[in-house]
Amino acid sequence: MDALFSLVASDIVSRLISSLTTRYTNLSTADDKLERMQWLLLRARTIVEEAHGQQISNDQGTLLQLRQLMESMYRGYYVLNAFQEPHTCSDTTAARRLRKLEAAMEGLEATIGDLKEFAVFLLDSPRLPHRQPRNSTHLC
């Protein structure tokens, strides 16, 4: 009987240790993915802001690429915000949220990876002229 009790106790302890190890590993993986997602969103936002400062003449392909980048960027912000909200949820819900974060991150990485030519095009495009705000005291 003591041997059976010892066997059951050791099995429970090993499962507990395995569960804690898995949970800690998932937390560090989630933190790494959050950091990667934030970096990708910063990169996407920089490209979008630079594109808004350029004079892009009716090039539908370029505008389509910019729109796709913006959609991926906004989707990434949405998933990131949803992931960072404090939730008291089960492991399956946390795993689902992590999968959504991974999917959004992969989509954003793919979109940014396809924009190498777009970035070169932006560098060659003329910048929009900077307009001074009107001064109401000097109106004639």
Image (tube, helix red, strand yellow):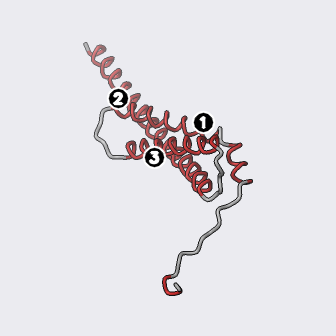
The residue positioned farthest toward the left in the image shown: 1
> Which residue is depicted at the point 52% across and 84% down?
139
Q: Position of residue 55 (x, y in %)?
A: 65, 56
65 displayed left or right of 136: right
Residue at position x 68%, y 45% in the image:
118
Q: Are marks 3 and 1 in contact (CB under 8 Å)?
A: no
SS state under label 3: helix
Query: In the figure, is residue 115 to the left or right of 22?
Result: right
| Disc 1 target residue | 110
Sooner in the amino-acid sequence: mark 3 or mark 1: 3
Please rate how many residues cluster around mark 2, counting C-alpha atoms within 10 Å: few if below 14, some from 14 to 19, many from 20. few
What quarter of the picture does the N terminus occupy? Answer: top left
Residue 92: mark in rendering: 2
Amino acid type at mark 2: Thr
Badge 3 density bin: few <14, some 14–19, many ≥20, Cα 10 Å: some
Q: How far apart in space, not on screen, are marks 3 and 1 (Cα)?
A: 16 Å
Counting residues from the start of the chain, the first of labels 1 and 2 encountered is 2
- Amino acid at circle 1: Ala
Mark 1 vs mark 2, foreground winner is 1
| Residue type for callout 3 | Tyr
Q: Residue at x 51, y 45 (%)?
A: 73
Under circle 2, the secondary element is helix
Q: Which residue is mark 3?
A: 77
Disc 1 is placed on an element classified as helix
Q: Residue furthest right?
A: 124
